[in-house]
Amino acid sequence: MNDIKIIKTKEDCNRALLLIEGLVDRDPEVGSVDADRLTLLTALVKDYESKNFPEHLPDPIEAIRFRMEQADLKPADLVPYIGTAARVSEILSGKRQLTLDMVRALSTGLGIPAKVLIQKPSRNFESQNWDTALVRTMERRGYFGKKTLKEHDKSELVSGFFAMFGHLQPTVLYRKTSFRSAPRTDNSALLAWGVRVLQKAAKMKVVTKYKKGTVNLSFMSALMQLSAKDKGPLLARDHLKKHGIKLIIEPHLPKTHLDGATFFAEKENPVIGLTIRHDRPDNFWFTLMHELGHVALHQDNDIESFYDEALQDKDGVEIDSKEKEADTLAEESILPKSKWETSAAKTTPNQFSTEDLANELGVQIAIIAGMIRFKHKNFYYLNKIVNDKSLSVRQYFMEEFEEKI
């Protein structure tokens, strides 16, 4: 760890941030030397920023709303802390300020720090406490246009980024969002990525409105047939566009393991965002089918967006019923249970049985190989097929993976 030293200047901080970015991209195992370096560097940067930049606390009303979301509370559940249903409504709408008694009750009952609640409510999004490494990556990806950290501070850049999308501030997105995410995920990065996807979607011209019920198992199975064709991912994007669904490709941000998300901000044109985090056909098509599963099953739910990260058993995160439903529909659209049960690949997973099954289904072989690995819970099977570099998906979306700075 000879390259790690106390941060005394902005130049020292920038150097540390570059090291952090490289370590984050490697996603080191817990307990490894690189993981320890990442922890130490992050602590040094936070210490430097806490001494050189003032603390910005979250808006008290947004803090209450976020706590309600975490604990699945309704406004009526706040009555014991605030007084009456009418008063709860006034507080949440910003028409009435919290009294000292309310602050004490909410702090004790909901665990919200009193120093957050005693602030004057503000509708401005405070972004000074955003991770600088994340903001730097957003800068390189072109999130801020031609603005850079050399000319603007990160608070100005982040606030301006969200302001471009009007009312969809991060705190608003939090309220009606379902996260399937690992414990170490940076939700700020997820939300920034989501707004970026929605910004791109706003620029995509779609003349057709999505007709409810269009996406179902039959639609998804038919879409899978495009995977066997040349430029299948592009054909899928065009096909979805004809039916009023916008497919946006945007690489994931550091400290996320995001594969995709579905947004219902505009019911008439659902938006699906994919990261192509793993440049393999099986990952691309399963994630696409999973997000379409949300369109088919959950459009009428009171949830405006679903963020779907790849989770490992070690993360210990319980996957909710809506995610399981989307997974089940995605699996059935790619490899129907009836076909799997009678396939030779179920008992003898080799190249020949995989090719036979793929030909029978009319689906690209690498996708079926990926499904077979998943079914057998053995991700060493069929490596040559699954990791065939000639089947790269990113090759069709290279402009999305070229950093601007």
Image: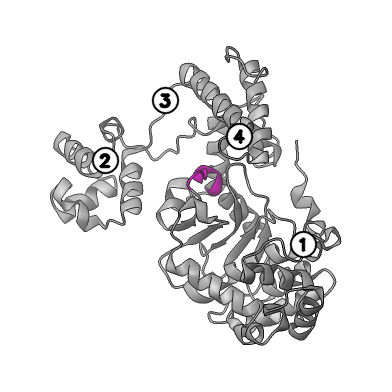
Disc nearest the viewer among 1 and 3: 1
- Which one is earlier in the sequence, the residue at label 4 or at label 3? 4
Residue in the picture at 43% in, 69% down: 321
Q: Is residue 185 magenta?
A: yes
Q: Residue at x 49, y 69 (%)?
A: 324
Residue behind mark 1: 383
Q: Dot 4 surroundings within 10 Å: few (below 14), some, or many (20 or more)? A: few
Q: Which residue is mark 2?
A: 111
Residue picked out by circle 3: 55
Residue that appears at 61% across and 34% down: 32
Q: Which image quarter holds the C terminus?
A: top right
Q: Residues within 10 Å of mark 1 (few under 14, many from 20)?
A: few
Image quadrant in which you'd find residue 379? bottom right
SS at badge 3? loop
Circle number at residue 32: 4
Closer to the eye: label 2 or 3: 2
Given the image, on which type of amino acid does mark 2 rest? Answer: Gly
Instruction: Identify the secondary structure beneath mark 1.
Output: helix
**Residue 129 in picture, x, y percent from top left:** 48, 31
Judging from the image, what secondary structure is the residue with disc 4 in?
A: loop
